[in-house]
Image (spheres, coloured by chain):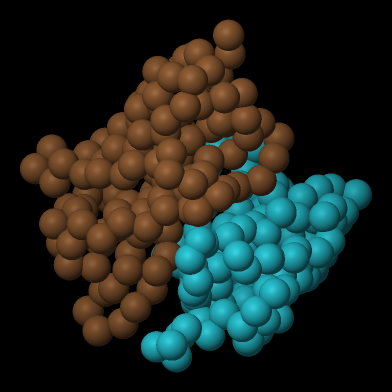
Chain colours: A brown, B cyan
């Protein structure tokens, strides 16, 4: 069974750096074809993809957040991380991590098939 | 970025009824590998999104056959037949063919 759980600071002030952790089980980020993605959702609004990291450490970012994002992983501890620098109130949202199945056996999927429960983040002075 | 246009925004339904949700992309979602990476999710109130359909028409594990996906290129549809109370929530389409990944704005399925 695949499970993911996000953790974060809850509240932080504008201009600070947001650090999020995704702790997962049921798969390994060292397994060929696996990945983890981050997605956020402001309250009452839609979903925005932020970043992905693959098993081979390839990383992809949403250019709308310019150079503020950094995604990383700790394979031995089954964790993935996301940092967002210089936050402001527009970064207030629920942040989700999700497993991405990139490739399984001989076929490609690029699908987020399991999501965490989400971590609520509020940016306020 | 690929714009995903979902319609309708709100969809009133009677239990046992059938509905369709449309998702149109601003460019073709056919990947260079020949696959089309268009997926459908349901977000129930207070929950995280759950995968229903992957790669246009494949039902995810445990998803009832009341859900079906179809389409190609830039035009995709999710159909739900015999709507049950647990089907209520917001439906999103997601394209993962092109970076950045983009979601539709959502369709809220609610009772009439």
Q: In the displayed structure, would residue A100 be above or below residue A91?
A: below
Residue displayed at 62% across by 68% down: B2
Is residue B86 or residue A48 the one in the foreground?
A48
Q: Is residue A96 left or right of residue B91?
A: left
Residue at horizontal 66 percent and vertical 46 percent from the top: A46
Q: Residue furthest bottom?
A: B34
Q: How many marks?
A: 0
- Residue at the image point whose x is 70% and y is 81% from the top: B75
Up/down of B6 relative to B110, above or below: below
Q: Where is the N terminus of chain B found, in terms of image quarters?
A: bottom right
Q: Residue B15 or A60: which is nearer the viewer? A: A60
Q: Is residue A12 left or right of residue A46?
A: left
Q: Can you name the residue that lies furthest to the left here?
A: A76
Q: Which residue is pictured at 63% across the width and 87% down the height?
A: B72
- Residue B49 pos. (x, y %): 54, 48
Q: Horizontal and vertical percent for residue A60?
A: 37, 57
Whole-percent x, y for residue A43 in the image: 66, 31
Residue A79 quadrant: top left
Q: Choose between A121 and B77: the one closer to the eye.
A: A121
One can see residue B39 in this view: no
Q: Is residue A48 above or below residue A103?
A: above
Q: Position of residue A28 (x, y in %)?
A: 17, 53
User: Residue B94 sits in which quadrant?
Assistant: bottom right
- For this view, does A70 lie left or right of residue A16? left
Which residue is the extreme one toward the top?
A125
Asked if residue A88 can be seen in this view, the reply is: yes
């Amino acid at each position: 069974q695949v499970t993911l759980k996000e953790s974060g600071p809850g509240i932080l002030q504008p201009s600070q750096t947001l650090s999020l952790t995704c702790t997962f089980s049921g798969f390994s980020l060292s397994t060929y074809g696996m990945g983890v993605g981050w997605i956020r959702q402001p309250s009452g609004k839609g979903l925005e993809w932020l970043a992905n990291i693959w098993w081979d450490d390839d990383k992809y970012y949403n250019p709308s957040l310019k150079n503020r994002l950094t995604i990383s992983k700790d394979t031995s501890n089954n964790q993935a991380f996301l940092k967002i620098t210089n936050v402001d109130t527009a970064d207030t949202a629920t942040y989700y991590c999700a497993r991405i199945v990139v490739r399984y056996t001989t076929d490609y999927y690029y699908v987020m098939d399991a999501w965490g429960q989400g971590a609520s983040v509020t940016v306020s002075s | 970025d690929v714009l995903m246009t979902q319609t309708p925004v709100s969809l009133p339904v009677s239990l046992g009824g059938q509905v369709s949700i449309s998702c149109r992309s601003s460019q073709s979602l056919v990947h260079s590998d020949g696959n089309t990476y268009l997926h459908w999710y349901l977000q129930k109130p207070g929950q995280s999104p759950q995968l229903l359909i992957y790669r246009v028409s494949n039902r995810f594990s445990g998803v009832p056959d009341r859900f079906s996906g179809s389409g190609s290129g830039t035009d995709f549809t999710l159909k739900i037949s015999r709507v049950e109370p647990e089907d209520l929530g917001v439906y999103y389409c997601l394209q993962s063919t092109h970076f950045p990944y983009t979601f539709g704005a959502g369709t809220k399925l609610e009772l009439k």
